[in-house]
Amino acid sequence: MSIILFIFYRLWSTGCTTTLNGVLSYLPCPTEVSNYALDQTKDEEKVILGGTPDGPLVALAFKLEEGRFGQLTFLRIYEGVIRKGDFIFNINTGKKIKVPRLVRMHSDEMEDIQEAHAGQIVAVFGVDCASGDTFTDGSVKYTMTSMNVPEPVMSLAVQPVSKDSGGQFSKALNRFQKEDPTFRVGLDPESGQTIISGMGELHLEVYVERIRREYKVDATVGKPRVNFRETVTQRADFDYLHKKQSGGQGQYGRVTGYIEPLPAGSPTKFEFENVIVGQAIPSNFIPAIEKGFKEAANSGSLIGHPVENIRIVLTDGASHAVDSSELAFKLAAIYAFRKCYTAAKPVILEPVMLVELKVPTEFQGTVAGDINKRKGVIIGNDQEGEDSVITAQVPLNNMFGYSTSLRSMTQGKGEFTMEYKEHSPVSHDVQAQLVNNYKGSNAAE
C-alpha cells in the first residue's frame, strides 16, 4: 500500500473529515493513476488498470482483522464495482465467494453500504483469504503484483503450556499466517515441536505475546535459532555405485556427474540438469535421482542446515535390467551427494541484516563501536538535526538483545529498524565454532 493510500485510509478511518477533504483536493483521481495487474492467462503479461467502474472488478486484500463477526477483510478496489451479494473469485486460491456484507470503516464504527467503486477502500465479512490475495468478478484472471516475501531468518520453538489450549493455539497460528506472509509455521520432524519463523527477534516476540493476549494461551518458548544455510564454493565430481544384494530383488544404481556453485545473483537456489546422451540410465529413473539430490541438500554435513545455490549435473550412470529401481537411484543420488560434498569446499551462510539506527550525536561513537564489536560493517552515517543516522550491515546472530543494549547505551533515546538483506559466508573462526557446536550437540544426543 502506497504512503498516500495509507494516509488516506488513516484519515478516513479516524473520521478526520475536514483534513480529509483538504487532502482529497490534492490527491489524484483513481482514473488518473496507472496501476498494473498481471494477466495469469498470458504468462503474467502486464495489464494497465484504468481505475474506472466500467471495467472488470479487480480488488486487493491488503489487511485482515479478527472482528466480532469473524474475519474482516480490507479491500482496495483498483477497477470495477463490488456489490453486496455479488459472487467474487479469489484468483490466488480459485475459490468462488459470495459477499454477504460490505462496509465502510469510520474509526471503530462500520457503515453498511450496497456497493463500492474503483479507488475506494472497503471491508467485507465472511471472506476466507490471505493478505495479498486478488479478487475479480470472474471475467478476468488478473493478480496484482505480489510482494517480495523474503525467506524467514529466525525461528523459535513454541508450544502451549496446557494441552487443553491446543485448539486456540492452532487457531492463532493459522490466523497469523494469513495476516503476515513473512510469518511461517512448521513442525520439527525430529523433536515434534512447533516452529515459528519470521524476520527477527522482535517480530516473533510480538506474535508470542499476541497468542497470550488475544487467545489467552500461555506458551513456552525455546531458544531463538538463526536460519543458517550452507553452500559449495567449487566444483566437485561424483561417481557412486549403489549396489545391494539381498535374498530377493537387489538394488543397483550408478550416478556420475558433478556439483558446482550457481553464479552470483542466480534466481534459483537449486538446479538439476541431465546431460546423459543415450540410455545409460532409463529416463523413468531421472526424476528419482533429482529427488534424491534435493533430499540430500535439505541437510548439509557442516551444521545440518539446507544447502542452497548449487547446481547438480548428471553426466553418466549405469543401470541393471532387474535390480535397478527408483529407490536404488534415489539412494545412489543421496550417497553421491554426501560423498562429494566435502570436496566441494562447503561454507556456512548466515543472514545479514540491514540495520538503520537513529541516535543522539553524543552517543554516536559508543553505538558505532558496539556495531563493530558485533562484526557489523557501517555503510552510511548521516546527520539529521541533532541525531546521527547510522546504516550498517550486521550478522543476525550478533543482534540478539540489541534493543536492550541500545537503550542502555543511549539513555533510552536511540531507536533502530532492521530488515533482511542477504545470506553471506561466515568467517573461518565462526564456521569452526558452529561446526564444533553441531558435532558436540550430536555427540550428546
Image (cartoon, grey):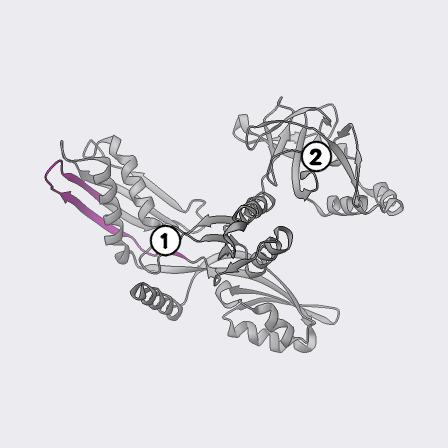
**Residue 165 place in picture, x, y as percent:** 54, 50
Query: What is the CA distance from the residue labelled 1 to the residue labelled 2?
Result: 41 Å
Task: Look at 52% across and 50% down and name the residue there.
Answer: 164
Image quadrant occupied by the C terminus? bottom left
Range of residues picked out in magenta: 229-256
**Residue 52 place in picture, x, y as percent:** 74, 27
384 vs 71: above or below: below
Q: Which residue is mark 2?
A: 124
174 vs 378: above or below: above
In the rendered structure, the answer to whether residue 99 lies left or right of residue 189 reads: right
- The amino acid type of the residue labelled 1 equals Glu
**Residue 42 place in picture, x, y as percent:** 54, 26
In the rendered structure, the answer to whether residue 250 lies left or right of residue 277 reads: left
Magenta stretch: includes residue 246? yes
Element at label 2: strand
Q: Which residue is mark 1?
A: 190
In the rendered structure, the answer to whether residue 206 lies left or right of residue 117 reads: left
Q: Nearer the viewer, residue 291 or 111?
A: 111
Check the image and name the residue furthest to the front.
164
Task: Look at 61% across and 50% down and name the residue there.
Answer: 215
Of callouts 1 and 2, which one flags the residue occurring earlier in the amino acid sequence? 2
In the rendered structure, the answer to whether residue 373 lies left or right of residue 106 reads: left
Q: Main secondary structure of the magenta part?
A: strand
Task: Look at 53% across and 67% down and name the residue there.
Answer: 400
Magenta stretch: includes residue 140? no
Q: Nearer the viewer, residue 227 or 79?
A: 227
